[in-house]
Amino acid sequence: SAVISQKPSRDICQRGTSLTIQCQVDSQVTMMFWYRQQPGQSLTLIATANQGSEATYESGFVIDKFPISRPNLTFSTLTVSNMSPEDSSIYLCSVNRGRPEGYGYTFGSGTRLTVV
Amino acid sequence: SQQGEEDPQALSIQEGENATMNCSYKTSINNLQWYRQNSGRGLVHLILIRSNEREKHSGRLRVTLDTSKKSSSLLITASRAADTASYFCATPAMNTGFQKLVFGTGTRLLVSP
């Protein structure tokens, strides 16, 4: 099963700035998923990152606000741009551990972002 | 939204007691998964049950699935303080080729010594 290294684990940022979150996977994966978890809430999918193509964004999320890079099959970044306090959340990356119906998903340890 | 509902939202029990959490979902599925999240950190995959299965066990965990009612339950037996966490059910979204996970609202479990 895949192991994901996500960083930073937490950050406190000023409004109007940007933060880039990195996820490194120890094996090659086709899709990487980025989630947001607002305080006390469940996880909401932001986008799916595919190597060699543009990320696919879910309704309510746009590329200008959450640009994603996927330079190879083991790495992806999510940038939270022009941050406001409403962006304070935990951000998580995830990959499928095996066949879609096989083994569940592996998650990074999360990035706890606080915007002040 | 495809997000499922879980109940209870919060559950407080004593060590040694059993904890049961329920999940309802809205669409057809090929499997349903349960995850645990400690203190707002990354999620850990606990168990996966396929749509043609009705019950599955893993250690102290028992999961049931009723596709006719679009519901699942997670039972943790003989709970321990270390089981304190949030628990989420998740289903691969059919309209995405079962690639994207849709999460339930979660149950916060507190197990007191």
Image: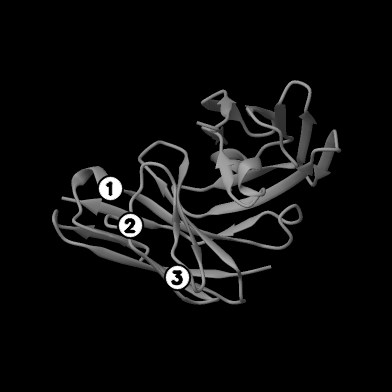
Say what amino acid the circle numbered 2 marks: Ile
Q: Which residue is at 75% across, 42% downward?
A: B30
Q: CA distance from mark 1 to mark 2?
A: 18 Å
Q: Earlier in the sequence, mark 3 or mark 1?
A: 3
Q: Residue at x 45, y 43 (%)?
A: A44
**SS label for mark 2:** loop
- Farthest-out residue, front: A53
Q: Which residue is mark 1?
A: A88
Quadrant of the frame with the N terminus of chain A: bottom right
Above or below A37: residue A4: below
How much space separates mark 3 and mark 1, taking CA atoms? 21 Å
The answer to which of A85 and B17 lies nearer the viewer is A85
> Based on the displayed image, in which of its 4 quarters is residue A59 positioned?
top left
Residue B72 shown left or right of residue A108 in the figure:
right
Marks 3,1: beta carbons within 8 A:
no
Secondary structure beneath dot 1 equals loop
Disc 1 and disc 2 on one polypeptide chain: yes
Vertical placement of B90 versus A99: above or below? Answer: above
Instruction: Report if the CB atoms under discs 3 and 2 are less than 8 Å apart.
Output: no
Name the residue rendered at 50%, 55% in the picture: B42
Camera-nearest label, 1 or 2: 2
Residue at 20% over, 53% down: A83
For mark 3, what is the residue? Answer: A76
Amino acid carrying label 3: it is Ser
Hey, which residue is sitting farthest top in the picture? B69
**Mark 1 or mark 2: which comes first in sequence?**
2
Write down the residue under mark 2.
A63
